[in-house]
Amino acid sequence: MERITDRLLSWASILEPGTLEQARAASTMPFIYPHLALMPDAHLGLGATVGSVIPTLEAIMPAAVGVDIGCGMIAVKTQWNREDVAGAGSLTTLRERIERAIPLSAGGNNRKVAATAEPRIAELTERADAIGLSPGAYVSKWELQLGTLGSGNHFIEVSLDESHAVWLFLHSGSRGVGNRIAGHHIKVAKRLTEAARIPLPDRDLAYLEEGTHEFDRYIADLRWAQHFALLNREEMMDRVIRQVSGFFGEPLVEGERINTHHNFTEHEEHFGKEVWLSRKGAISAKLGEPGLIPGSMGTASYVVTGKGDKFALESSPHGAGRTHSRSAARKKFTREQLREAMRGIEYRDSAAFLDEIPQAYKDIDQVMADAADLVSVRHTLRQILNVKGD
């Protein structure tokens, strides 16, 4: 850990100057307490750095959570092993089954509400009604987004751990409805701070003050979107399980299931005070708490246990962290380099994934080395199958 200032601590051995300056600016906000914590995977984000943990007193910055509210990971350990995979058939067949079962890409929606999604949508509808939220005002057919993956770095993977056990791994968030909710509240915060003529180091650090209607509205909507994201992952995982069970010819027996956010806010106590703790690209890593840290395409992912480091605000990194923007990655790397990185892994060979090449990210092994005081590694997962949206 490096103390950059009294209000900015860093666990990142790889840190771009622009990322550091962005985090330094956020740490100067008057309501930060006790300090902002930069995770090993930190990189530039909108207003607030991705891979940062931001504790605030009686205020919250919507951009500190980000626009993919509740984005996170879910993993399930199965009873199968490497030998079972070898005897089950073609992984191409399994990939195509998963791709048919789950809508992919940014605009991918379900054609109708699946039977498994109905009770989850009913729960979300009840929650929305209880807080006076109309999700349809943001996305008219939001119900059709439950059980959809999205694009970018969202993925579905089948992996093997160090003992060759099969795991199912999935990364996604609150989809378009969460994005629209976040965007609305970021605009509200900007409008209020501009009207009050409050000077900011970055206008995307606009904030809402506790005790106001706008603050209460944001927290209520945020919690709904976080729950949507959690149920979205559960719905997709259940669909993946059905396809994988069909592939192996027997029902899946779950050995373990972990479902965690890495873009979210919770009310927690740190250093003797109640704060709003926003983890933007970071997971909760309380003592003994299970967590998931994915690498990029073609690299390892990790099932971890939190160590409860108080200076890191009981948090840890959420992944590898980008070193190249999507446009820069497309210019620098080639499809042949992507194919080489994915050698031995079943995936859809598409130029659309070039910006997700492992070389566009930090070395996940270095990230995990930097996080040694934050989490302990229980399992190291290696992909054998990858599904992504364009």
Image (tube, rainbow, N blue to C red):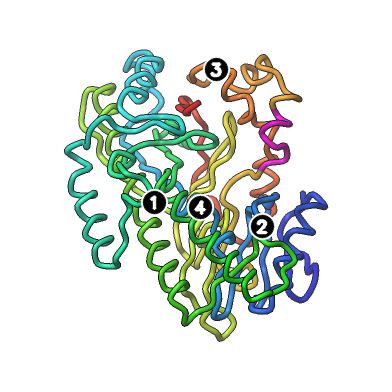
Determine the image quadrant of residue 310.
bottom right
- Asked whether 211 falls inside the magenta stretch, the response is no
Determine the image quadrant of residue 198.
bottom right
CB contact under 8 Å: marks 2 and 3: no
- The amino acid at mark 1 is Asn
CB contact under 8 Å: marks 2 and 4: no
| Circle 3 crowding by C-alpha within 10 Å: few under 14, some 14–19, many from 20 | few
- The amino acid at mark 4 is Val
- Tell me how far mark 2 sits from mark 3, CA to CA: 32 Å
Please state which of residues 166 and 191 is positioned toward the viewer in this rendering: 191
The secondary structure type at the circle numbered 2 is: loop
- Residues drawn in magenta: 322-329
- The amino acid at mark 2 is Gly
Is 277 rendered above or below residue 154?
A: below
The secondary structure type at the circle numbered 3 is: loop
Determine the image quadrant of residue 273.
bottom right
From the viewer's perspective, is 302 left or right of 104? Answer: right
For the point 64% across and 29% down, the residue is 355
Q: Percent position (x, y) of residue 38?
A: 68, 61
> Is residue 160 visible from the viewing direction of this image?
no
For discs 1 and 3, the disc positioned in front in the rendered view:
3
- Tell me how far mark 1 sits from mark 3, CA to CA: 29 Å
* Location of mark 1 (residue): 259
Q: Which mark is residue 47?
A: 2
* Location of mark 4 (residue): 304
From the viewer's perspective, is 52 left or right of 235? Answer: right
For discs 4 and 3, the disc positioned in front in the rendered view:
3
For discs 1 and 4, the disc positioned in front in the rendered view:
1
- Tell me how far mark 2 sits from mark 4, CA to CA: 29 Å
| Circle 1 crowding by C-alpha within 10 Å: few under 14, some 14–19, many from 20 | some
